[in-house]
Image: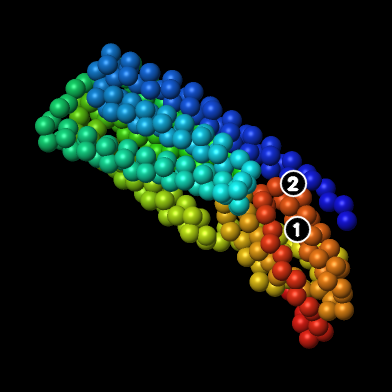
Amino acid sequence: MTVPDENASTYESRQAEADKTTVVSIIANAFLLIAKIIGGTFGRSQALLADAINSLLDLVANMVVYMGRMIARKPPDREHRYGHGQADTLAAIFVAFTLLIVGGYIVYQAIHVIIHKNYVAPTTLATVIAVFTIVLKEILYRWTIRVGRESKSPAIIANAYDHRSDAYASLGALIGIIAAQLKWPILDPIAGIWIALLIIRNAIVLIRENVHSLMGGNPEPESEQQVLETLNKVTGIKSVRDLKLRSMGTYLIVDVVIMVDQGLTVRDGHDIASECKQFLIKSNGRIQDVMVHVEPFDNSQEKR
């Protein structure tokens, strides 16, 4: 049986685009870090200076994501028989904890300002940089979340939510800047607290989803359905039983029991199992390994 490998090539293409989003994120956050420091200093905006800390943490998180994805792409070795795919998941969890730190820091800064009434009227420069940051981060979010979902990369999806949280944080900074310019400075820290709570919520969701993956939780239901449909096309399989999938970052590991004609020889059963494994791997670039167990089929059992 010949199997086209468009799916495998599409998978690699998506992974390459996912890597590109990380490189662009590193460049963008380095640029924003410098811009916010300049804007906060010369534009007299404490909110923008606080947001610069956010960009610094983002830069560190992006580098961790990039390294994590490079490690995740390494092939299986003697000590990691199922590959290094979970490095992608670990990078996503790191980004999530970074978001928690950012959210907590924004709350701390906001409460500190309210208690000590450290209000300063920012200049137009701070406003311009805050608006630019919001627009850029929203564009990066929309691109990165699309690529992350297509590539099934936990780290890239986490990076996307990091961009969205940055847009929220900068929006809070912008509200504070404008409020201070309009003589309502207390709205600055209040908006900051609200935005921080949104960031913390996103971080908790990311941590929960990626811990689920580390614990061997089931991947998305459509992946199992796709594998089942592919198996049912393999000649010689009478029924598919006990199909299990688990995520290894962007990769999938498949364990399955197939039923074959009980009159076949051991060699014939082995050949069908081998064809089944190769068929799955070629038809889906995410599948890294397949464990096939063969059992005899009789007429009382129906094809699933």
Position of residue 101 in the picture relative to residue 164 (left or right): left
Identify the element where label 2 is drawn: helix
Residue 280, by quadrant, is bottom right
Instruction: Tell me what residue is drawn at x 32 percent, y 37 percent.
Output: 102
Whether residue 261 is visible to the viewer of this picture, yes or no, is yes
Instruction: Tell me what residue is drawn at x 32 percent, y 19 percent.
Output: 37
Q: Nearer the viewer, residue 237 or 289?
A: 289
The nearer-to-camera label among 2 and 1 is: 1
Q: How is the image coloured?
A: rainbow
Where residue 217 appears, x then y in whole percent?
Answer: 52, 61
Instruction: Relative to 231, say whether 63 is above or below.
Output: above
The extreme left residue here reads 116
Mark 2 and mark 1: Cα distance apart in space: 15 Å
The extreme front residue here reads 78
- Under mark 1, the amino acid is Lys
Residue 293, by quadrant, is bottom right
Task: Classify 10 Å Cα crowding around label 2: few (below 14), some (14-19), many (20 and above).
Answer: some
Position of residue 224 in the picture relative to residue 118 (left or right): right
In the rendered structure, which disc, 2 or 1, sits on the residue that comes first in sequence?
2
Checking the image for residue 7, the label placed there is: 2
Instruction: Relative to 145, say whether 267 is above or below.
Output: below
Instruction: Write down the residue under mark 1.
Output: 277
- Under mark 2, the amino acid is Asn
Position of residue 70 in the picture relative to residue 7 (left or right): left
